[in-house]
Image (cartoon, rainbow, N blue to C red):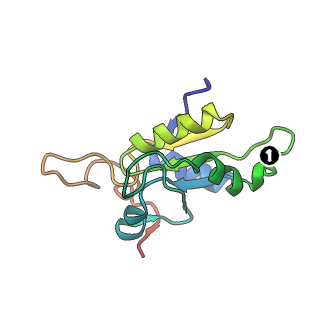
Amino acid sequence: MSATAPQALAPEAAHTLIHDEPRSVFIDVRSSMEYLMVGHPVGAVHIAWLDEPDWVPNPRFIAQVRELMLGGAACADGDCPAIILICRSGRRSLDAGQALTRAGFKRVFYVSGGFEGPLDNDHHRSTLAGWRFENLPWEQC
């Protein structure tokens, strides 16, 4: 994997990786309102990549991920847990994943199709692809 290329995982493959590797870190990078109001995957930790009101990359994103991974202590002898990112459709999680790989994180994945998937012809989400479309575990506040 190159320094700027996180790997895409289909929602079911991401769910399997999370199950098979309990040390993996699952991060929802959507805005606070999306995470709270639209719902989120069960077990996902929220660290926004872009958030209201300015919609610019979170300047503390890398530091917050490092803190989540115990400041790097979660990696023993180069054995780092997988980092799996999810957003609404896959674009923001790809961007956030590229930032993580540039910062030196090695096992970075993003969920292709995201939580809600792309818009269908009627401008609805969760009808073509995504975590919810695949009926994977999610919850809503």
Determine the residue located farthest toward the front in the rendered image: 54
Give the percent coordinates (x, y) of residue 63.
65, 49
Q: Is residue 55 left or right of residue 106?
A: left
How many badges with numbers are in the image?
A: 1
Q: Is residue 141 found left or right of 99 in the rendered image?
A: left
**Residue at 65% over, 35% down:** 103
Query: Would you say residue 18 is visible in this rendering?
Result: yes
Q: Kindly state the secondary structure of the residue where label 1 is placed.
A: loop
Q: Is residue 37 above or below residue 26?
A: below
Camera-side residue: 141 or 22?
Answer: 141
Q: Which amino acid is tagged 1?
A: Cys
Q: Which residue is mark 1?
A: 75
**x, y percent for residue 22:** 69, 57
The residue at the far right in this view is: 77
Residue 33 as seen in the image, left or right of residue 81: left
Residue drawn where x is 39% and y is 60% of the image: 135
- Quarter of the picture containing the N terminus is top right
Q: Residue furthest top?
A: 2
Residue 22 can be seen, yes or no: no
